[in-house]
Image (spheres, rainbow, N blue to C red):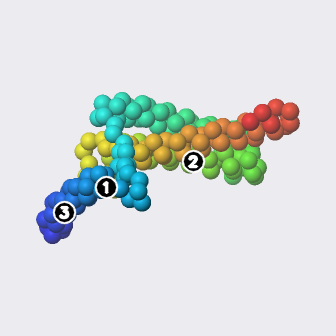
Amino acid sequence: MHVYKIQRPILQYNRLKWQEQIMELLKDITNEEVAEKPVRPIPSITISADRLEKEREVHLVVAALIATVTFAAAITVPGGLKKEKGSEQGIPFLIHDATFKAFIVTDALAFLFSLCALLFHFGMLPPFSSIQRPTFLSHVGATTFLGYATYAMVIAFCTTIYVVLKPSYGLSFVC
């Protein structure tokens, strides 16, 4: 365990040294021509820390709302639960319906993706657990998970509408 703590700063120093060498080589190449055409540097994405922080706050609110809505949707099952006493009590009426199963899966995925986005922003996932401030990479990861959570939530909503409105065929195809 002590070896890891000693080697980590050395690896970070080597990585910084390699990055500096690569940047120097890129500067040399930009002034040259390859195949009779000037070489242009690849534009790098630069986002200010203030912008990252503002987007982070918005993402946290959206991820928390998605987690709350999907949790509530899973608890209040569409179609209701069986209330008669016995072994069937508490089982959803639509348990054998394929679209109900699709709802359960997509709702669970939306919940998990939104939690992953929250964990990315709080820096609790392994690749970013040692980073104390928000970085571009954690921002991209959280945005990706938030996008997946949104898609899964929309699909869960559509399957819920279909399951509940299936008896009236005209309304069930709205979604």
Amino acid type of the residue tagged 1 in the rendering: Glu
Q: Residue at x 45, y 42 (%)?
A: 143
139 or 172: nearer the viewer: 139
| Distance Cα–Cα, label 1 vs label 3 | 28 Å
Nearer to us of marks 1 and 3 is 1
Q: Is residue 103 left or right of residue 136?
A: right
Crowd around label 3: few <14 · some 14–19 · many ≥20 (10 Å): few
Identify the residue under disc 3: 14
Nearer to us of marks 3 and 2 is 3
151 or 19: nearer the viewer: 19
Q: Answer yes or no: is residue 75 visible.
A: no
**Label 1's element?**
loop
| Distance Cα–Cα, label 3 vs label 2 | 42 Å
The earlier-in-sequence mark between 1 and 3 is 3
The percent coordinates of residue 80 (x first, y second) are 70, 38
**Label 3's element?**
helix
Residue 37 vs 147, above or below: the answer is below
Identify the residue under disc 2: 108
Q: Residue at x 66, y 37 (%)?
A: 157
The percent coordinates of residue 142 (x first, y second) are 42, 44
Identify the residue under disc 1: 32
24 or 31: nearer the viewer: 31
